[in-house]
């Protein structure tokens, strides 16, 4: 069910809201940065996302995958979301929102949602990695 969630970084300098359907699924990637951050995300279309506060407080890190903008708060270091440009596996821009940064998320709804795994480590985004227990 579509619901508006609000979220923020740890210190509150970056605040956002997004219209999400958690029951449609969440995801985890095995690329280096997602693994090290233990990122668990939910995808949002750009038109369903609204940055309320903190554009100037965000720092953009790009690794070897230049379509992924790993945004984090320059004060507390929390990674509330990332912006994915094209070309990518969907053919459209999207955002990955860090589930840990969403306020009021229902744990039962989260546990009931399908969970997809992505093999970003091998640039094989359409496949599930052979090992996912650590994600």
Image (cartoon, helix red, strand yellow):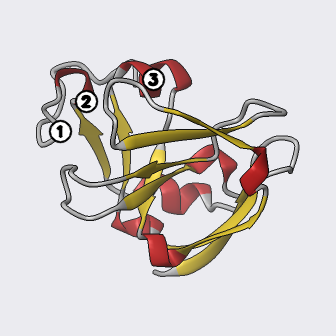
Mark 1 — residue? 125
Tell me the distance, in whole angstroms, between the alpha carbons under discs 2 and 3. Answer: 10 Å
Q: Position of residue 25 (x, y in %)?
A: 35, 59
Residue ID at (50%, 56%) = 110
On residue 22, the disc is none
Splitting the image into 4 quarters, where does residue 90 fall? Answer: bottom left
On residue 120, the disc is 2
Q: Secondary structure at mark 3?
A: helix
Density class for disc 3 (Cα within 10 Å; few <14, some 14-19, many ≥20) is: some
Q: Secondary structure at mark 2?
A: helix
Residue ID at (35%, 67%) = 24
106 with respect to 83 (left or right)? right
Q: Can see residue 84?
A: yes
On residue 33, the disc is 3
Q: Can see residue 103?
A: no
Tell me the distance, in whole angstroms, between the alpha carbons under discs 1 and 2. Answer: 5 Å
Q: Position of residue 117 (x, y in %)?
A: 27, 38
Instruction: Pick the quarter of the image with the C terminus.
Output: top left
Is residue 68 placed above or below 12 in the rendered structure? above
Residue ID at (17%, 38%) = 125
Q: Secondary structure at mark 1?
A: loop
Is residue 33 placed above or below 41 in the rendered structure? above
- Mark with earlier residue (1, 2): 2
Density class for disc 2 (Cα within 10 Å; few <14, some 14-19, many ≥20) is: many
The reply to whether callout 1 and callout 2 are in contact (CB within 8 Å) is yes
Q: Position of residue 72 (x, y in %)?
A: 66, 38
129 with respect to 4 (left or right)? left
The reply to whether callout 2 and callout 3 are in contact (CB within 8 Å) is no
Tell me the distance, in whole angstroms, between the alpha carbons under discs 3 and 1. Answer: 15 Å
104 with respect to 121 (left or right)? right
Q: Position of residue 76 (x, y in %)?
A: 82, 32
- Mark with earlier residue (3, 1): 3
């Amino acid at each position: 069910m579509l619901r508006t969630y609000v979220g923020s970084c740890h210190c509150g300098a970056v605040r956002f809201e997004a219209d999400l359907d958690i029951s449609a699924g969440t995801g985890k990637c095995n690329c280096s940065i997602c693994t090290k951050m233990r990122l668990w995300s939910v995808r949002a279309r750009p038109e369903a996302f609204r940055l309320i506060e903190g554009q100037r407080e965000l720092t953009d890190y790009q690794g070897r995958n230049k379509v992924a903008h790993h945004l984090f708060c320059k004060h507390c270091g929390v990674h509330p979301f990332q912006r994915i440009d094209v070309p990518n596996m969907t053919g459209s821009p999207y955002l990955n929102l860090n589930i840990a940064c969403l306020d009021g998320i229902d744990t039962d709804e989260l546990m009931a949602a399908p969970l997809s795994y992505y093999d970003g480590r091998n640039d094989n985004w359409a496949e599930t990695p052979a090992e996912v227990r650590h994600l």
